[in-house]
Amino acid sequence: MDQQPGETPSHPDEGAVTQPPPHATGVFSGLNAASLLRDIAISIGLAIVLIVFIYQPVKVEGTSMMPGLEDQERIFVNKYQYKLGNDRIERGDLVVFLFPLDPRQSYIKRVIGIPGDTIEVEDGRVFVNGNPISESYVPDEYRDHVSTVRQVVTPNHYFVLGDHRSSSSDSRMWGLVDRPAIYGKAVFVYWPPDKIGRVR
């Protein structure tokens, strides 16, 4: 059908665009700003929830976990992971716990023995269930020659050691760690910047 002058096409071409009224541009920009502010607020809120309820920032004090963790480094501890029930404490985990001899202090150590394990240290070499374990996280210069009697890790307890064996106070001296005393797993280094990354 022929279009008469002044009439609007009943079937405009596909892909055609129409310009918004002049006053709509300001409203659109305002909506973008509001959305941005909302997204920022949500992100900040989620970060606060993560830090307060899941991750706890802590400062490493001392040299017992060198070279993996050094004195004054800042790390995040996942304090919710072991409360889920489906993520148990395993050998090799770096755990944060209340020091058995003074619960006002917190220690960080590596789990070597879990409930039921037989642990023995001979001249600095660690045996778990009769087998020597490979400990690549302990450099030769950080080893010592301490020996301990063979012991079985009792239910609900853990045998823990520092990676810097020659300067670590750990289960060789003061015994096992009770499960309720363990309140977090070290997961991430966030300071200094050159050390940022997952805890190993």
Image (cartoon, grey):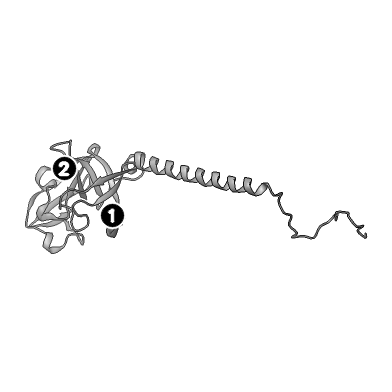
Marks 2 and 1 in Cβ contact (< 8 Å): no
Q: Position of residue 152 (x, y in %)?
A: 16, 45
Exactly how many numbered labels are in the figure? 2
> Residue tagged by mark 2?
176
Look at the picture and state if 158 lies above or below 67.
Answer: above
Identify the mark at residue 55; answer none if there is no mark: none
Quarter-of-image position of residue 99: top left
> Residue tagged by mark 1?
199
| Amino acid at pointer 1 | Val
Q: Position of residue 129 (x, y in %)?
A: 18, 53
Quarter-of-image position of residue 105: top left
Q: Nearer the viewer, residue 161 or 69?
A: 69
Indicate which disc, 2 or 1, sits on the residue closer to the N terminus.
2
Q: Nearer the viewer, residue 118 or 83?
A: 83
The reply, left or right, for residue 35 in relation to residue 63 is right
Q: Gap between marks 2 and 1, in whole Å?
A: 23 Å
Quadrant the N terminus occupies: bottom right
Q: Alpha-carbon neighbours of circle 2 within 10 Å: few (<14), some, or many (≥20)?
A: some
The reply, left or right, for residue 66 in relation to residue 14 is left
What's the residue at 15%, 50% (across, down)? 62
What's the residue at 72%, 54% (across, down)? 19
Q: Nearer the viewer, mark 2 or mark 1?
A: 1
| Amino acid at pointer 2 | Leu
Q: Position of residue 47 (x, y in %)?
A: 40, 44
SS at mark 2? loop
Quadrant the C terminus occupies: bottom left
Q: Nearer the viewer, residue 134 or 77?
A: 77
Q: Alpha-carbon neighbours of circle 1 within 10 Å: few (<14), some, or many (≥20)?
A: some
Q: Nearer the viewer, residue 73 or 145?
A: 73
SS at mark 1? loop
Q: Position of residue 29 (x, y in %)?
A: 59, 48
